[in-house]
Amino acid sequence: MQETLSMLYLWLKAGHVIFVIFWMAGLFMLPRYFVYHQEAEPGSAEAARWIDREAKLRKIILTPSLIMVWIFGLATAFSIGAWSQGWLHAKLLFVLGLSGYHGWLVGYAKKLAKGERVLTGKQLRLLNEIPGLAAVVIVILAVVKPF
């Protein structure tokens, strides 16, 4: 029985890591797409192509990966009984933050599609650093388990 649980844990963990990679790739790509989109002439064919690219990235990679990250992550936490460990609580806080960032990106993509350009390219480039910084903290919490 213990061997079966160990094997299940490894598969859950592998699935979690795989979808984290996909999700993070999308979180890095979408703000960069926004920069290029904002540089395109409003209403142009190029702007329309960016709207299409952004929608595909969200629908094919970002949102499905977010869902799978949560499913595999929660299943992994359950399989090892990590709910009482402080590092998991902190990790969940940062993952919730990234999930909120994901939601904000989706909302901003919809604004851009309507022609609303609220942020500058520089601001979008700075926002592009958020997933990287969060990833550093999350990986340290999950690997080092400092508390």
Image: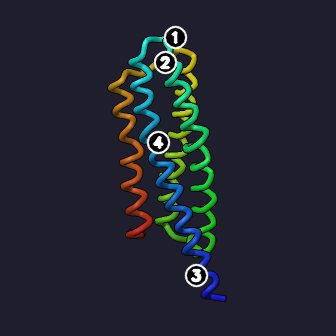
Q: What element carries label 1?
A: loop
- Label 4 crowd bin: few (<14), some (14–19), many (20+), radius 10 Å: many
- The location of residue 22, given as percent across then percent down, is 50, 51
Q: Residue 1 carries which label?
A: none
34 and 111: which one is in front? 34
- Label 1 crowd bin: few (<14), some (14–19), many (20+), radius 10 Å: few
Disc nearer the start of the sequence (3/2): 3
Which three-letter amino acid code belongs to the residue tagged 4? Leu
Q: Name the residue under label 3.
A: 6
- The location of residue 139, given as percent across then percent down, is 40, 61
Which three-letter amino acid code belongs to the residue tagged 3? Ser
- The location of residue 8, given as percent across then percent down, is 61, 76
Question: Nearer the viewer's eye, disc 1 or disc 3?
Answer: 1
Q: Name the residue under label 4.
A: 27
User: What residue is shown at x 34% (from left), y 33% (from top)?
Assistant: 126
Question: Nearer the viewer's eye, disc 3 or disc 2?
Answer: 2
Q: Is mark 3 on a helix, strand or loop?
A: helix
Q: Is residue 20 above or below residue 120?
A: below
Rounded to the nearest angstrom, the CA distance separating label 3 from label 2 is: 49 Å
Q: Name the residue under label 1.
A: 43
Q: Is residue 104 above or below residue 138?
A: above
Disc nearer the start of the sequence (2/4): 4
Rounded to the nearest angstrom, the CA distance separating label 4 from label 1 is: 25 Å
Q: Do we see residue 128 in this rendering?
A: yes
Which three-letter amino acid code belongs to the residue tagged 1? Gly
22 and 27: which one is in front? 22
Tell me whether circle 3 and circle 2 mark residues in contact (CB < 8 Å). no
Disc nearer the start of the sequence (1/3): 3
User: What residue is shown at x 56% (from left), y 44% (from top)?
Assistant: 61
Q: Mark 2 points at which residue?
A: 47
